[in-house]
Image (cartoon, rainbow, N blue to C red):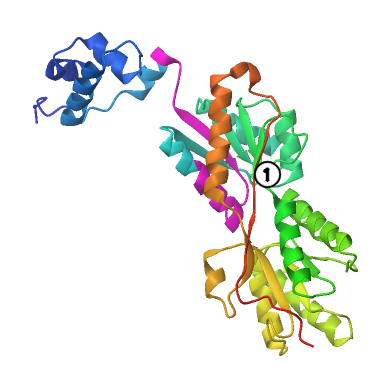
């Protein structure tokens, strides 16, 4: 490897090794189109040999591009937001961008504005916001901040492009599966009422039951945690003991479904012999529960890739950056052992 005297290699070192001018190296580094392919190969080979790292600040001054995108996230302790963020980060890296991530704990206008300001200070070229709550989606639409902006699970009418999983379709598929097995109704353990995904899953559950001509029980509201699923599982068991028909339950996420399974086990209800249970998310543990959990799969990698595609498209066409776009990723039902026909 050519030596640079113990210092970090600079652009002139690359030019010397490649046998080209300093300006040619600059053009290659900054992606200028008017450079012959054989010259590009020679310069890149020299960059690799020297371990040269382009100065990102200087490059940004020349190209007016930072190659940094922003991500706004809420409650990444939960599986869905965490996996969505991971999918976005992976897609950004594959597209050659760095991702600056800001978590939002305070959903007040001031809290959201502070988070957006942090991304502005990072000179991000655009932003992907994971917006599971209606309050956050509304705040983003009303506040100035990084543009273009793409919302993930941002709901309709947000005023900017939205990418997300078809939550309603996933819920309808879960209910259709249980009704198809012969269950005359399906109870629902819902997620947090202020989350758009929970709202869509409730709507899909209700509409599918109505379409099948079945009674719609009163849903039970959880908070996405196993503890809330456990508590509501006991309430469902009490309803069954009191004579209510409880043979099938659709749970709005797998973590609450874990709690429901434990509650049923404690009171002697067998799954799926006595009660069928279907979850949502397909967390890694779902396949290894006893029984294996039937659930609705969300393809978070595909969501991240779709969000980046929309954002990069907006960067290429800034005049259309705020044009409403709805890119929907289908949900997929994965049948395992926790669902079966009702016992006679």
Using the rendered view, name the quadrant where residue 28 is placed. top left
318, above or below 81, in the image: above
Residue 261 as seen in the image, left or right of residue 289: right
Circle 1 Cα neighbour tier, 10 Å, few/some/many (<14 / 14–19 / ≥20) = many
- Confirm whether the magenta stretch covers residue 274: no
Using the rendered view, name the quadrant where residue 145 is placed. top right
| Quarter placement of the N terminus | top left
> In the image, residue 70 lies at what x, y percent?
53, 34
Residue in view at x 31 percent, y 20 percent: 29
48, above or below 227, in the image: above
Q: Secondary structure at mark 1?
A: loop
| Viewer-closest of 1 and 294 | 294
Residue in view at x 81 percent, y 70 percent: 187
30, above or below 114, in the image: above
Using the rendered view, name the quadrant where residue 157 is placed. top right
Residue 190 as seen in the image, left or right of residue 124: right
Residue that badge 1 annotates: 153
| Viewer-closest of 191 and 37 | 37
Residue in view at x 25 percent, y 11 percent: 24
> In the image, residue 319 lies at what x, y percent?
63, 16
> In the image, residue 79 lies at what x, y percent?
58, 58
Residue bounds of the magenta highlight = 62-88
| Viewer-closest of 61 and 178 | 178
> In the image, residue 106 lies at what x, y percent?
68, 44
| Quarter placement of the C terminus | bottom right
265, above or below 2, in the image: below
| Viewer-closest of 296 and 46 | 296
């Amino acid at each position: 490897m050519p030596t640079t005297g113990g210092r970090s290699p600079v652009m002139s070192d690359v030019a010397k090794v490649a046998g080209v001018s300093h300006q040619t190296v600059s053009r290659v580094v900054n992606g200028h189109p008017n450079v012959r392919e054989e010259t590009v190969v020679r310069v890149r080979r020299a960059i690799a040999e020297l371990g040269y790292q382009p100065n990102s600040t200087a490059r940004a001054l020349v190209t007016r591009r930072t190659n940094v995108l922003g991500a706004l996230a809420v409650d990444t302790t939960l599986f869905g937001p965490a996996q969505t963020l991971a999918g976005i980060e992976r897609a950004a890296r594959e597209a050659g961008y760095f991702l600056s991530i800001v978590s939002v704990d305070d959903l007040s206008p001031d809290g959201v504005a502070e988070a957006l300001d942090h991304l502005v200070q990072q000179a991000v070229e655009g932003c992907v916001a994971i917006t599971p709550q209606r309050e956050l989606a509304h705040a983003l639409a009303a506040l100035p901040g990084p543009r273009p902006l793409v919302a993930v699970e941002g709901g309709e009418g947000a005023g900017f492009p939205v990418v997300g999983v078809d939550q309603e379709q996933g819920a309808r598929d879960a209910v259709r599966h249980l009704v198809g097995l012969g269950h005359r109704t399906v109870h629902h353990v819902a997620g947090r009422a202020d989350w758009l995904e929970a709202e869509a899953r409730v709507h899909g559950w209700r509409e599918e039951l109505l379409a099948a001509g079945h009674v719609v029980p009163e849903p039970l509201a959880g908070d996405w945690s196993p503890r809330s699923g456990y508590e509501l599982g006991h309430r469902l068991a009490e309803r069954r003991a009191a004579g209510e028909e409880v043979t099938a339950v659709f749970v709005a996420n797998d973590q609450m479904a874990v709690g429901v399974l434990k509650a049923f086990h404690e009171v002697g209800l067998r799954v799926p012999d006595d009660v069928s249970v279907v979850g949502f998310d397909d967390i890694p543990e779902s396949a290894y529960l006893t029984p294996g959990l039937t659930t609705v799969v969300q393809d978070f990698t595909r969501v991240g890739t779709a969000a980046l595609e929309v954002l990069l498209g907006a960067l290429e066409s800034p005049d259309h950056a705020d044009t409403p776009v709805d890119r929907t990723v289908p949900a997929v039902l994965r049948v395992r052992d926790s669902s079966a026909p009702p016992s006679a």
